[in-house]
Amino acid sequence: MKGMFGSILPLPRFIKSSPEEGKPIMRRNSSAWQKSRWVWPRHGSVLGLLFGLFLGLLLGVAPSTIAAAAAPACPANVLGVEREIVLGTKGGFALGVKSYPQTLDLADHEVVLTFDDGPSPATTPIVLKALAKQCVRATFFLIGRNAAAYPALVRRELAAGHTLGHHTFSHPAKTLRLMSDAAARADIDKGFAADDKAAYGPPTAKATTPRVPFFRFPGFADTPRLDAWLASRNIGIFGADLWASDWRPMTPRAELKLTLARLEKEKRGILLLHDTRRSTALMLPKLLVALKKRGFHIVDIVPGPGAPPKFQQALKGWRSETAAILAKVLPRMEKAMSLKRKRSRRRIQAPIAPEMPEPRHQRVMAGHDGQG
Ligand SMILES: [Zn+2]
């Protein structure tokens, strides 16, 4: 465990799971509609409908309601979801080898799709359509401000069976690491509340943890204190194993090529994408078709009770790539922030400040120009 924080970052306590507790559920060849406890046959729309009608008559529920729930079935030639991993978060965890020395126990050619920063009305619907067409489920790490602005999109993600993780309320440009601990915690909690309200409606009681205790730091800029605080609240931290670098402007074609090359190299992993990026939304249909063709399988992650499952440990000599990036970027950012503070102090002291800039309008669409 080397790298900038390798020797000083106390990773959240990892509780090794018992054989039964937190064991990943193996559901090979399951379809996107087999997420809930109601498991329909993959090609069983007719059987499902008949069973639905029977159940409807038995329970006195309108047959149309049952039929609507039973109707969709995935064609045989789509990518689909190979299996689901149920992740207990008791005691917390931090995974994703770009930042942490462990990751999900994925087999060769298994991929977890994750999308950060949404929802966005311009691009998220395109992403959802592409995922639905291939019967694929993903995890969306929502920005609270965007969730509050577009709750219908959050509910669409939920209705399609995707997992809703969290990514702060405001996605602060300076990252949580350069904020005070109290301010960072407040932004994280505000994000949890906004995401959950958008997805599930106002809470009935004062909720202390989000419904889905999955969190990703903007720019992967965690701190040991925040990591420990999240672990104490049984919240799992997600980094990534590979990314599409879609924060950089590029054509959908270039992004597709880059992503596939990285997937072929790494062979598996948690892939970070952004559903707010147009290039990502436009290349996604082709990416999913290519994944199917090249023998990749999609793994869905959902929260569960108990301790986390067994994770894969990084190889000897592992280094945190994001720590190295942040070590270069953050000092420059800190310097720019300090200069800005000095300038604004000078302006406040001046009796007339004609050069004072217009107040910055708060953008509805929060996001970032860096990774994560
Ligand atoms: Zn982000």
Image (cartoon, helix red, strand yellow):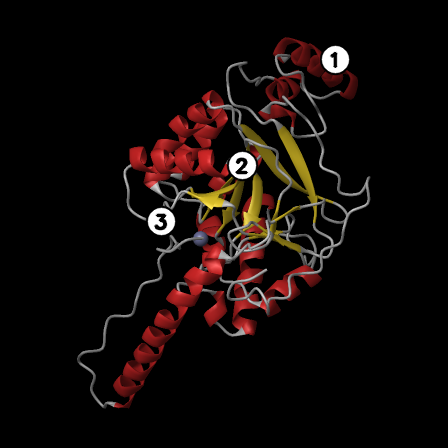
Q: Earlier in the sequence, mark 3 or mark 1?
A: 1
Label 3 vs label 2, nearer the camera: 2
- Give the crowd class for mark 3: few <14, some 14-19, many >=20 residues within 10 Å: some
User: Is the CB of the residue bearing disc 3 within 8 angstroms of ligand 1?
Assistant: no
Q: Amino acid at mark 1?
A: Phe
Taking the spot 34% from the left edge, 76% from the top edge, the residue there is 335
Q: CA distance from mark 3 to mark 2?
A: 21 Å
Does any portion of residue 174 appear in the rendered image?
no
Q: Quadrant of residue 219?
A: bottom left
- State the residue position of label 2: 268
Residue 333 image position (x, y, % from top left): 36, 70
- Give the crowd class for mark 1: few <14, some 14-19, many >=20 residues within 10 Å: some
Side of 337 where 77 appears, left or right: right
- State the residue position of label 1: 54
Disc marking residue 349: none
Taking the spot 35% from the left edge, 62% from the top edge, the residue there is 362
- State the residue position of label 3: 247
Between 69 and 223, the residue placed more toward the observer is 223
